[in-house]
Structures are given as C-alpha cells and as structure tokens.
Amino acid sequence: MTMKLELSPEVQAGLLAQAQASGMSLEAYAEQVLRREALRGGQEGRSLNTNERPIWEVITEIMKDVPDDVFDRLPKDGASQVDHYIYGLPKRD
C-alpha cells in the first residue's frame, strides 16, 4: 500500500532527525513506527513519546552499538558482588 502524508515542517524535521539517529531513511523509519503502532493495536491513548516506551526497548536501543568485546570484559559475578565493584567492599562468599 502506498500512503501520502502531509506533515508540518516541525514534525518532518523531528522524524528526519530520529531516522538519521537510527541510521535509517525517513521512509523506513516512518514505516517502522507505523508498523510498531499497528502491532500494538487496541492500546489507544499511548503516544510515541520515547519516555513511554517499555524499559527493555530503551535499554536495547541504548546498548545496540556496544561491541561484544565490551560485554566480554564485564565481571561474571557483577550482580552478586555489586558492592565490591561499585563501592570497593570485599567480595562476599
């Protein structure tokens, strides 16, 4: 299906900036946003405000460009020994 949208210059500039930040064309980004909203179906009242996205989407977006070797350097016991790694306390048994 082909759709033509008349957007204000402000909305177009905002969408273009978000598309470029995502490394996408304006058309591909708009299609992604529309597809996501269509799949959400029946959840009226929700906006496209990024502050209202589920936390896992925000984390995934933030972490998408982190190289795998950075994750490989993270401690495997980071969750259980958080006080050691953040505050320098001795490791717990």
Image (tube, grey):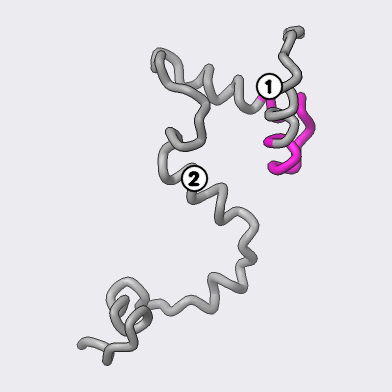
Q: In which quarter of the view is residue 24 placed?
A: top right
Circle 1 residues within 10 Å: few <14, some 14–19, many ≥20: few
In the rendered structure, the answer to whether residue 13 lies left or right of residue 71 reads: right
Residue 38 lies, in percent from the top left, at 53, 17
Q: Quarter holding the N terminus?
A: top right
Circle 2 residues within 10 Å: few <14, some 14–19, many ≥20: few
What's the magenta bit mostly, secondary-structure-wise?
helix
Q: Specify whether residue 25 is painted magenta.
A: yes
**Where is 91 relative to 6, above or below?**
below
Say what amino acid the circle numbered 2 marks. Answer: Val
Q: In which quarter of the view is residue 75 placed?
A: bottom left
Nearest the viewer among 53 and 71 is 53
Label 1: element kind: helix
Residue with the mark numbered 1: 11
Residue 73 lies, in percent from the top left, at 53, 79
In the rendered structure, the answer to whether residue 32 lies left or right of residue 88 reads: right
Identify the residue at image location x=48%, y=42%.
Answer: 57
User: Would you say the residues marked 2 and 1 are in contact, meaning their CB atoms lie under 8 Å apart?
Assistant: no
Residue 7 lies, in percent from the top left, at 72, 13
In the rendered structure, the answer to whether residue 5 lies left or right of residue 49 reads: right
Query: Which residue extends farthest front?
Result: 10
**Where is 2 relative to 86, above or below?**
above
Q: Specify whether residue 30 is painted magenta.
A: yes
Identify the residue at image location x=41%, y=44%.
Answer: 55
Identify the residue at image location x=68%, y=36%.
Answer: 18
Say what amino acid the circle numbered 1 marks. Answer: Val
Which of the labelled discs sits on residue 19, or is there none? none
**Where is 80 relative to 45, above or below?**
below
Which region of the structure is painted magenta? 18-31
